[in-house]
Amino acid sequence: MYAVLETGSKQYRVTAGDTLEIERLEVEAGKPFTFDRVLMVGNEGKFTLGSPTVAKATVTADVIAHKRGEKKIAFKMKRRKGYHRTVGHRQELTVIKITEIKA
């Protein structure tokens, strides 16, 4: 059984036991979290599509840790003007482990 869920304006295909890095959730590490924006559920060749979400379908996950992603560098420059800027960004991430899919 698998599900497609939406969180942080991104979609993920998950099965029970998967570990994901997603956008930061406001939940303490070690606590469970329930995703209710389930867009699709697949079970042994049978699919349930939502419009936009599947009614009464949830995905439960345990929050393992919070971390920061790798540093991305953006460099801006205008030639012959003496203007150059280096900007770095590190995305806040949450590591989760999928425990259960209810359809």
Image (cartoon, helix red, strand yellow):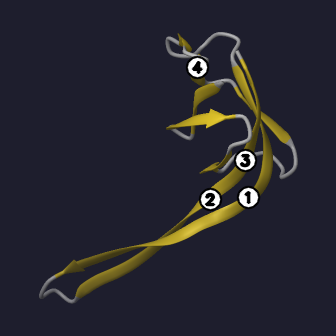
Judging by the rendered image, the residue that carries numbered circle 4 is 42
In primary-sequence order, the first of circles 1 and 3 is 1
Amino acid on which disc 1 is placed: His
Judging by the rendered image, the residue that carries numbered circle 3 is 96
Judging by the rendered image, the residue that carries numbered circle 2 is 92
Residue reaching furthest to the left: 80
Amino acid on which disc 2 is placed: Glu
In primary-sequence order, the first of circles 4 and 1 is 4
In primary-sequence order, the first of circles 1 and 2 is 1
Q: Are marks 1 and 2 in contact (CB under 8 Å)?
A: yes
- SS state under label 1: strand
Q: Is residue 50 above or below residue 35?
A: above
Quadrant in which residue 4 is drawn: top right
**In the image, is 96 to the left or to the right of 80?**
right
- SS state under label 3: strand
Which residue is more in the foreground, 90 or 2? Answer: 2
Judging by the rendered image, the residue that carries numbered circle 1 is 66
Q: Are marks 1 and 3 in contact (CB under 8 Å)?
A: no
In the rendered image, residue 57, in percent from the top left (x then y), is placed at: 69, 16
